[in-house]
Image (cartoon, coloured by chain):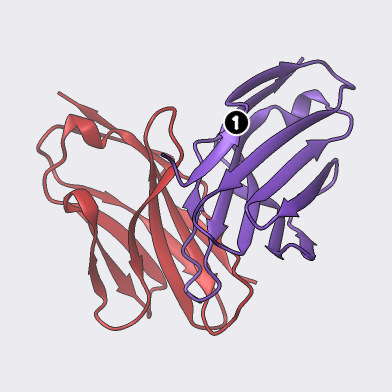
Amino acid sequence: DADVTQTPRNRITKTGKRIMLECSQTKGHDRMYWYRQDPGLGLRLIYYSFDVKDINKGEISDGYSVSRQAQAKFSLSLESAIPNQTALYFCATSDPGQKRNEQYFGPGTRLTVT
Amino acid sequence: AQSVTQLDSQVPVFEEAPVELRCNYSSSVSVYLFWYVQYPNQGLQLLLKYLSGSTLVKGINGFEAEFNKSQTSFHLRKPSVHISDTAEYFCAVSVSGTSYGKLTFGQGTILTVHP
């Protein structure tokens, strides 16, 4: 079984709809991250969480919110989806004991906003 | 703040030829460096990492990278590529000596290996 899972894997939604992307991990890591990937821009950090009570904005948090329901679960919400949020979204985890910041990625969610 | 620049957005190459994917970084403090690979329709997988010590780092699938502090570069190389190496490659940096835990990624390089 995969260590980091994301649901759904693909989603098409309409402008203005609220949508939630979910991430679960079995690695036992405290740190979790949400990124979006756009062609030619690489991965950009949306939000990150170092534990259940610690959530921080990344470089592109506008239009997004997150919830850390448990150590193993970190959800990303788009309150009112817009077309330029069409992208590939990745969840990742890391172990705070390893300060080298190596991260482990889920398979991604492809989101299309029409 | 640190930044990463991957100098080539696309690199086409023939099978069994050597390849180099270039990565430069900018940081005022010591860094850790990573290369990740993304195969079509998959997540990112760690290829190799530089933490400290030897500047030549070997990774999976025959890839290696060399850390050059004076040139602030971390180029990825493979002496002979295969069709299966076709993927997108990302260079990433994090700042050492901190518990911040954030990675900064480059824009990605699409490697296409032709038969």
Tell me which residue sits at (62%, 26%) in the image.
A8
Tell me which residue sits at (19%, 30%) in the image.
B83
Q: Position of residue A94 (x, y in %)?
A: 53, 62
Quadrant in the picture for residue B68:
bottom left
Quadrant in the picture for residue A32:
bottom right
Tell me which residue sits at (85%, 46%) in the image.
A62
Work out whether residue A27 or residue A81 is closer to the camera in this orientation and state it. A27
Q: Position of residue B81 (x, y in %)?
A: 16, 40
Q: Chain of mark 1?
A: A
Q: Is residue A32 left or right of residue A100?
A: right
Q: Is residue A57 left or right of residue A30?
A: right
Label 1: which residue?
A: A109
Q: Is residue B105 above or below residue A19?
A: below
Q: Colour of chain A?
A: purple
Q: Position of residue B30 (x, y in %)?
A: 49, 82
Tell me which residue sits at (47%, 53%) in the image.
A104
Q: Position of residue A97 (x, y in %)?
A: 51, 76
Q: Amino acid at mark 1?
A: Thr
Work out whether residue B69 or residue A63 is closer to the camera in this orientation and state it. A63
SS assignment at label 1: strand
Asked whether residue B111 appears in the rendered view, the answer is no
Q: Colour of chain B?
A: red
